[in-house]
Image: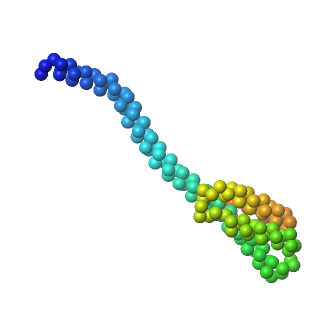
Amino acid sequence: MDSNQSNDSIEDIFDSSLNLEETHFKEGYDEGYNHGLNTGKEEARQVGLKTGFETGEELGFYKGCVDVWNSVIRVDPNRLSARVQKGIKQMEELIEKYPAIDPEDESVQEIMEALRLKFRVLRAALGMKLDYNGYPKPKDIEF
């Protein structure tokens, strides 16, 4: 073995020792990044499921109200004023217009806000004390 080869191997040993901290830092960063990426995807999925469920639940509540009000109109067409009947029809159209299949549609928030507003107007016009408060928490349910 000549002296150039032994000097190169000694330098390689020192280089790897000097770069040890940088190597470990990069490995740790890469592992943390990959773990965070996977964890973030799962957390985003869970948040998406929860938000989707809550939105569907609220839409179902409004649809149920519209169905009941339409039943009242079928049984007694003169029971509700023309203005209230028009509001019910508008609310029904908003529910049908909601883009359930395309969650990235930009009109989602606008439609939900319009539904909430229309519900409040109808509730006031009918003199009802009905609110959508979301799904009841287990501690709020009594048997």
> Taking 112 as reference, is 22 above or below it?
above
Image quarter of the N terminus: top left
Does 40 sit left or right of 110 as displayed?
left
- Residue 141 visible in this rendered orientation of the protein: no
Write the residue at 77% across / 78% down. 71
What colour scheme was applied to this rendering of the protein? rainbow
> Taking 2 as reference, is 123 above or below it?
below
Write the residue at 47% across / 45% down. 37
Write the residue at 13% across / 19% down. 2
Write the residue at 81% across / 78% down. 73
Pick the front one: 64 or 6: 6
Pick the front one: 38 or 99: 99
Does 1 sit left or right of 93 as displayed?
left
Image quarter of the C terminus: bottom right
Picture quadrant of residue 105: bottom right
Which residue appears farthest toward the top when viewing the image?
3
| Picture coordinates of residue 134, whole percent (x, y) | 69, 60
Which residue appears farthest toward the front when viewing the image?
106
| Picture coordinates of residue 25, whole percent (x, y) | 40, 32
Picture quadrant of residue 70: bottom right
| Picture coordinates of residue 121, whole percent (x, y) | 82, 62
Q: How many marks?
A: 0
Picture quadrant of residue 18: top left
Which residue appears farthest toward the left when viewing the image?
1
Does 54 sit left or right of 122 as displayed?
left
- Residue 8 visible in this rendered orientation of the protein: yes
